Image (cartoon, rainbow, N blue to C red):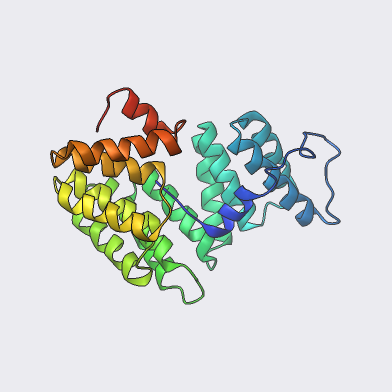
């Protein structure tokens, strides 16, 4: 599930300059437990992004002890515990986040993503609908894309496409919606549509490894060796260390 909660994402972007971010039992710069918890959440996320999950657990557990009644703390704990494979703890944290943050669309967007990843697509879509319809939520198109990914994972391709199309009505050049729609088209054996989406994407958005990889595969499916080679050269030149470049170099095209 490609869950894109802006509030949680903001926390995940914090504290990436780790010069001062070292594990210390004395690190609690906030004047209140809530402020200290916010710092520890940021540290937990930063170390999770670096793959240092044991350290991430240390900081999120400290944050939980400092402010267990904050929905964002619980939501981030859910993400950390899920990454660690600690299913019971993740479930508890996500459920607490949803209970505490039922009026917070960012938290509920994160919770809906968790429901979808754990095989509860119908429940997840229902929560996504409440997020999309929430008048205070500033980016409903994000939840629309997430709902589409959820339904696609559950085998409802038509439902997924409807959500991607809705997102593109709200935000016509939304990169993730274009990527998901193009990938779905290719999987449904419509490489011409996928190639068209890729070409339009590159007219209005910066290239990514994912979109170039999609373009390469669409061109190959259309029998256009030159077009595929062009995407391959761009992928290798601009994103040489990406997973997509490694797949291409390994000869994997699916």
Residue found at the far top of this picture: 250
Q: Where is residue 121 in the image (x, y as percent from the top left)?
A: 32, 51
Seen from the viewer's position, the closer of residues 3 and 187 is 187
**Residue at left 29%, top 39%?**
230
Seen from the viewer's position, the closer of residues 46 and 114 is 46
Seen from the viewer's position, the closer of residues 92 and 166 is 166
Q: Quadrant of the C terminus?
A: top left
**Going by the image, does 171 lie left or right of 4?**
left
**Residue at left 37%, top 66%?**
129
Q: Where is residue 156 in the image (x, y as percent from the top left)?
A: 21, 52
Q: Which image quarter: residue 142?
A: bottom left
**Going by the image, does 17 lie left or right of 156?**
right
Residue found at the far bottom of this picture: 135
Q: Where is residue 36 in the image (x, y as percent from the top left)?
A: 78, 51
- Total numbered badges shown on the rendered structure: 0
**Going by the image, does 163 lie left or right of 55?**
left
The image shows residue 131, relative to residue 152, as above or below, that is below
Residue 146 in view of the camera = no
């Amino acid at each position: 599930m490609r869950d894109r909660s802006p509030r949680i994402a903001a926390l995940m972007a914090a504290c990436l300059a780790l010069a001062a971010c070292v594990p210390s039992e004395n690190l609690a710069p906030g004047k209140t437990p809530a402020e200290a918890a916010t710092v520890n959440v940021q540290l937990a996320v930063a170390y999770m992004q670096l793959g240092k999950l044991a350290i991430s657990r240390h900081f999120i557990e400290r944050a939980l002890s400092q402010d267990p009644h904050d929905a964002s703390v619980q939501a981030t704990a859910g993400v950390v515990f899920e990454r660690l494979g600690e299913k019971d703890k993740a479930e508890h944290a996500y459920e607490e986040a949803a209970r505490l943050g039922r009026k917070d669309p960012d938290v509920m967007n994160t919770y809906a993503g968790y429901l979808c990843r754990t095989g509860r697509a119908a429940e997840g879509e229902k929560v996504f609908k409440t997020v999309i319809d929430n008048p205070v939520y500033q980016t409903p198109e994000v939840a629309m894309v997430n709902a589409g990914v959820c339904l696609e994972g559950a085998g409802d391709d038509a439902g997924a496409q409807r959500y991607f199309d809705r997102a593109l009505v709200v935000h016509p050049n939304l990169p993730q919606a274009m990527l998901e729609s193009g990938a779905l088209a290719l999987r449904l054996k419509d490489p011409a549509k996928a190639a068209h989406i890729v070409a339009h994407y590159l007219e209005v958005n910066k290239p990514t490894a994912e979109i170039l990889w999609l373009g390469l595969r669409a061109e190959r499916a259309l029998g256009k060796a030159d077009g595929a080679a062009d995407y391959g050269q761009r992928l290798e030149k601009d994103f040489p260390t990406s997973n997509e470049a490694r797949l291409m170099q390994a000869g994997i095209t699916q």
